[in-house]
Image: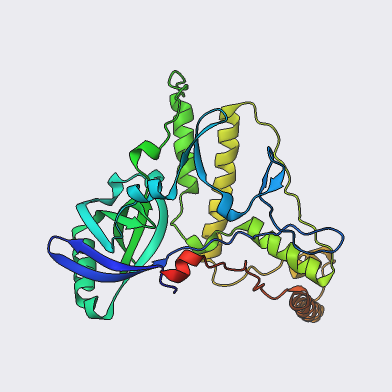
Amino acid sequence: MHTLWKGSISFGLVNVPVKMHAATESQEFKFNYLHEDCKNRIRSIKKCPACDIEVGTDDLVKGFEYEKDRYVVLSEDDLASLEQPMSRSIDILDFINLPEIDPIYYQKSYYLSPEETAMKAYKLLCQSMEESGKVALARVTMRSKQHLACLRVFEKGLVMETMHYPKEIRHMDVVWDSVVPTEAELTMARQLIENLARPFEPEKYHDELHEQMVGLIESKIAGESYQVDTPAKGGKVVDLMEALRASIALTENEKGQLKASDNDEGPIKPLKSIKRVQAEKPIKAVESKELFARVEKDEESDGEKLTDQGKSTEKPKSTLTPRKRTTRRAKEA
């Protein structure tokens, strides 16, 4: 993984040199604007609408709009005077319980891996935090900005989550305090939640829009058409209790199917042969054996045809991924 930052974790008198790596990556597709006639990429032009001239980078200054169309100009020296001194330290402030932090505070995840000379101290910190059930609240300065951060153990290593400060969190305007659900509605809602409860398996969740975008791009490259199946829209539900009852019935049915598939040792055999035998008139034992033999032979040939069709229609898994862009600051780190 690419190293974004090098520094150390400091708690008490202990200092653990670490390297920082991005723990997540964007799968969003980036598009460029092209000239429709020649398909060449257009360039952005900075132009002053008042002077009606193109402006170069050297002619730009930073301004803050404190009133409508009124700005205060801040020079590079002004901004430099407020910059935090370059720090290579992640200073642990407190150890707390993870459930006390609401996920709304989290910004972005980074992996912290140890330098070769600090593997024992790194492992000591990881194991101690894991056994105590605590996470660390820390302060770190990156790109001249001070961040609040949370350090926790993940996959036998440390991950650092940069966090929002309390002032950055917006609060909801609560207007539904006077609404009181009935006990029957609460009971059915709890039952519905229980029916939909599953263990967390992140592999089963997919970005469907991303997969459709891959299919669309690959089809365009190959000169083929691409069509997305539009899901059927459900009818408008007016009665809340009726909606809960219908949802519970649906989830109970799905739950039963899941249990049946788990208990079965193999795939469910088709009832084709039984229907054929029942449709016939009573026959002799010898004729019955011959009929069953013909039916089984037909089913085997039908199964082979379906298997061949499945193989021919199955598309290879796409390897198309958005092009990664490395920023200048990341290269210099």
Q: Is residue 274 left or right of residue 99?
A: right
- Residue 177 coordinates in the image, percent (x, y): 43, 21
Task: Judge whether 54 appears above or below 282 on screen.
Answer: above
Residue at 77% in and 73% down: 313
> From this viewpoint, which residue is outermost toward the right?
37
Picture coordinates of residue 319, whole percent (x, y): 64, 74
User: In what quadrant of the picture does the C terminus appear?
Assistant: bottom left
Going by the image, does 217 lie left or right of 178? right
Count all numbered tags in the image, as a single digit: 0
Front-lying residue, 278 or 311: 311
- On the rendered structure, is 84 left or right of 324? left
Q: Residue at x 62, y 70 (%)?
A: 267
In the image, farthest residue toward the left: 13
Of the pair 221 and 99, the residue shown nearer to us: 221
Q: Where does the N terminus fall, quadrant-wise?
A: bottom left
218 to 193, vertically: above or below: below
Residue 295 position, x and y percent, is 79, 76
Q: Residue at x 59, y 44 (%)?
A: 250
Coloration of the structure image: rainbow
Percent position (x, y) of residue 17? 25, 71
Q: Residue furthest top?
A: 178
**Viewer-side residue, 216 vs 231:** 216
- The answer to which image quadrant residue 87 occupies is bottom left
Residue drawn at point x = 31 percent, y = 60 percent: 86
